[in-house]
Image (cartoon, helix red, strand yellow):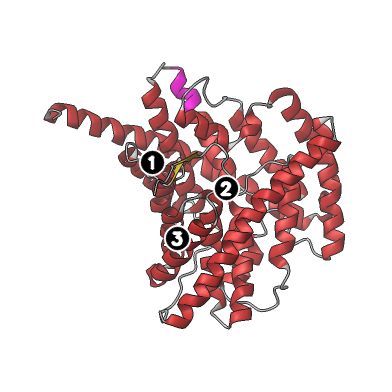
């Protein structure tokens, strides 16, 4: 049994480490949220910018082709370094992902931000840590803590950020070795970002919910739809990526071609709502607004699969949230359920299946929408995870073997 001195030393180390990483995560979150807010506003105010999306694609393609081949592994690279620390998360990942995500949003690619924020924070934290030659275990601890800080700061859900950082490393298992430093970092990042009054995707509390058998079977349907959407999204994005690699042999040209497809989709859909984050669409679903087209989730699905599959940067996290929210709203309309409730549940259940993180996603729902929906969030997140087959957006995620 460790001595009181040893325990005090470990606790102090975790608290200090968590505080420092939390400050880094807060700095990244504030800069990133402000930059992407500017990019999305600028695109909306200057409609001609989307016609430069092919040029933006070429710039991103050339940059990653010459300087970022390893960086293109994204969040999977961070996961690999947690499992088996090696050369480290490249220091150039932070500026490259930040700039490429900003450019992607400015000119209209349908990509996310939280996944990119995790990569940026992890790159900075690991890059600084390697200057002091820490042990491999300390580096692993730092990366897990960085994920919690980024998630808590960018999305405004510190507790879900902690659980996600501990849960998504390995499907079917939660690892607790970094829990104190992760909690400290997530809370520091969250409260620091909150002091800037920045806008998150949603902050809508749900009212009282009557839990009955009718609601439960409707939630089962929503969970199945969410799982199907998540797995279809993963397969579609991989299909686009493989097809682009097969037919376009020069990598920098792939996002250029993807940009022309995105512009064609704007014409076909008759809307620019699916460019960038598409946050306003999701907010309409969360308040039960009418007028959202029934195919909105499908359009967002296709826009994002093509954008990410051809090489634009930003991550899958927020697009999956929005696809799930829009799909949840349509399921509610068909089944005669509450649109705000099913939009909220669809959001977290879809990401639960895609990331293999049902507990984190249920907690996220509670933090964002209130504890009234605890049971619906839990039912949908667990069921969507259970029926999804445990594939997902993170190819480097370990899978825990289940023996019967």
- Point out the frontmost of discs 2 and 1: 2
The reply to whether dot 3 and dot 2 touch (C-beta < 8 Å) is: no
Q: Is residue 110 visible in this depiction of the protein?
A: no
Per the image, the residue denoted by label 1 is 185
Q: Would you say residue 127 sits in the magenta stretch?
A: yes
Q: Which residues are magenta?
A: 126-131
Circle nearer the N terminus (3, 2): 3
Q: In the structure shown, which secondary structural element does the residue marked by tag 3 occupy?
A: helix
Q: CA distance from mark 2 to mark 1?
A: 26 Å
User: Residue 398: image x %, image y %?
Assistant: 48, 38
Q: Is 107 left or right of 232, judged from the image as shown? A: right
Q: CA distance from mark 3 to mark 1?
A: 27 Å
For residue 347, what is the image quadrant? Answer: bottom right
Main secondary structure found in the magenta portion: helix
Per the image, the residue denoted by label 2 is 392
Q: Is 352 left or right of 182, judged from the image as shown? A: right
Please state which of residues 121 and 381 is positioned toward the viewer in this rendering: 381
Q: Is 102 left or right of 356, judged from the image as shown? A: right
Image height of 31 relative to 251, above or below:
below
Mark 3 neighbour density, 10 Å: few (under 14) some (14–19) many (20 or more): many
Q: CA distance from mark 3 to mark 2?
A: 15 Å
- Point out the frontmost of discs 3 and 1: 3
Per the image, the residue denoted by label 3 is 382
- Residue at 61% from the left image edge and 60% from the top image edge: 228
């Amino acid at each position: 049994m460790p001595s009181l001195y040893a325990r005090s030393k470990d606790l102090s180390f975790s608290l200090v480490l968590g505080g420092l990483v939390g400050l880094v995560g807060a700095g990244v979150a504030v800069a990133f949220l402000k930059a992407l807010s500017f990019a999305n506003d600028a695109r909306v105010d200057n409609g001609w910018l989307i016609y430069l999306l092919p040029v933006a694609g070429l710039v991103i393609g050339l940059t990653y082709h010459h300087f970022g081949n390893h960086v293109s592994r994204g969040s999977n690279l961070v996961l690999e370094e947690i499992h088996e620390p090696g050369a480290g998360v490249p220091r150039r990942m932070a500026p490259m992902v930040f700039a490429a995500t900003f450019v992607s949003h400015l000119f209209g690619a349908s990509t996310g931000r939280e996944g990119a924020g995790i990569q940026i924070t992890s790159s900075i934290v690991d890059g600084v840590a390697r200057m002091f030659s820490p042990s491999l275990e300390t580096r692993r601890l730092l990366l897990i803590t960085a994920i919690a800080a980024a998630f808590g700061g960018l999305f405004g859900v510190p507790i879900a950020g902690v659980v996600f950082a501990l849960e998504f490393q390995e499907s079917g298992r939660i690892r607790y070795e970094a829990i104190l430093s992760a909690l400290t970092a997530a809370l520091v990042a969250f409260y620091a970002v909150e002091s800037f009054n920045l806008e998150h995707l949603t902050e809508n509390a749900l009212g009282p919910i009557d839990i009955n058998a009718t609601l439960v079977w409707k939630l089962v349907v929503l969970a199945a739809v969410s799982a199907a959407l998540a797995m279809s999204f993963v397969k579609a994005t991989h299909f686009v990526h493989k097809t682009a690699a097969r037919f376009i042999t020069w990598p920098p040209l792939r996002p250029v071609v993807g940009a022309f497809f995105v512009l064609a989709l704007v014409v076909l859909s008759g809307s620019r709502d699916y460019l960038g984050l598409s946050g306003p669409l999701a907010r309409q679903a969360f308040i039960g607004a009418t007028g959202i087209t029934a195919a909105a989730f499908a359009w967002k699905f296709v826009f994002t699969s093509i954008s990410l599959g051809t090489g634009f940067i930003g991550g899958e996290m927020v697009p999956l949230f929005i696809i799930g929210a829009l799909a949840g709203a349509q399921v509610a309309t068909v089944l005669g359920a509450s649109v705000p409730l099913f939009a909220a549940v669809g959001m977290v259940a879809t990401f639960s299946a895609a990331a293999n993180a049902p507990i984190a996603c249920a907690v996220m729902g509670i933090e964002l929408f209130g504890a009234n929906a605890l049971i619906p969030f839990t039912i949908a997140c667990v069921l969507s995870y259970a029926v999804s087959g445990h594939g997902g957006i993170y190819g480097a995620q370990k899978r825990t073997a289940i023996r019967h």
